[in-house]
Image (cartoon, rainbow, N blue to C red):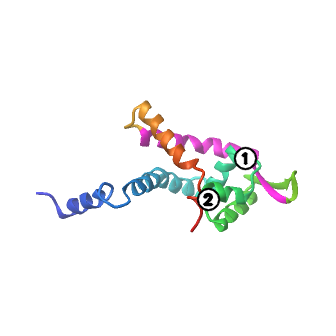
Amino acid sequence: MARQGDNRRAAALGILDRNEIRLAYRLSWLANFYSGPIYRRLERRPGLTRPEFIVMFCLAHAPGISAAEICAATGRPKNSISRAVNRLIGDGRIRRRADPEDGRAVILDLTEAGRTLYAKLIPEFRTREARMLAPLTPAERSELDRLLGKLVHREDDWAEVF
């Protein structure tokens, strides 16, 4: 006979299949279980917060962008990105410089220390992604990537804050 706790766990996991926003809830669930364990380890090991890693990630892929552009690219709040930027500058992981196209604007770059730390951390994210996607065939992975790209690169104002 099943224990009461087993029944509650099964009911809780059933939410993944039976709810009125099933796809969005599943995407959120996957994102939480993908990133949650990694970010908890980052906070313990190099003492890096999620917003700090996000800033480093953005600068690794788009050097010379501003904090406002990081906010726009990630949907993260301005105050958390600002705190992360200031801490990373203080730790010597990123640097701030005047935008050569607009001297009033400030852009950001990873320092050598920041690039080294990023290179050390990103394999864990790749490994976690591979584990998450393991049940999918290469063709299914490609189709999932195509469909997610279609949702991400849309032309309407869906992602605007309301």
The range drawn in magenta is 105-133
Circle 1 crowding by C-alpha within 10 Å: few under 14, some 14–19, many from 20? few
Q: How many marks?
A: 2
Could you say which is closer to the camera, residue 143 or residue 42? Answer: 143
- Does the magenta stretch mainly form a helix, a strand or a loop? helix
Mark 1 and mark 2 lie on one chain; the one further toward the N terminus is 2
Going 46% across and 40% down the picture, which residue do you hit?
A: 144
Going 59% across and 45% down the picture, which residue do you hit?
A: 121
Badge 2 marks a residue whose secondary structure is helix
- Image coordinates of residue 106 in percent, x first then y, are 81, 58
Going 64% across and 65% down the picture, which residue do you hit?
A: 80
Quickly name the residue at label 2.
Answer: 51
Could you say which is closer to the camera, residue 89 or residue 74? Answer: 74
Amino acid type indicated by mark 2: Pro
Amino acid type indicated by mark 1: Ala
**The quadrant where residue 123 appears:** top right
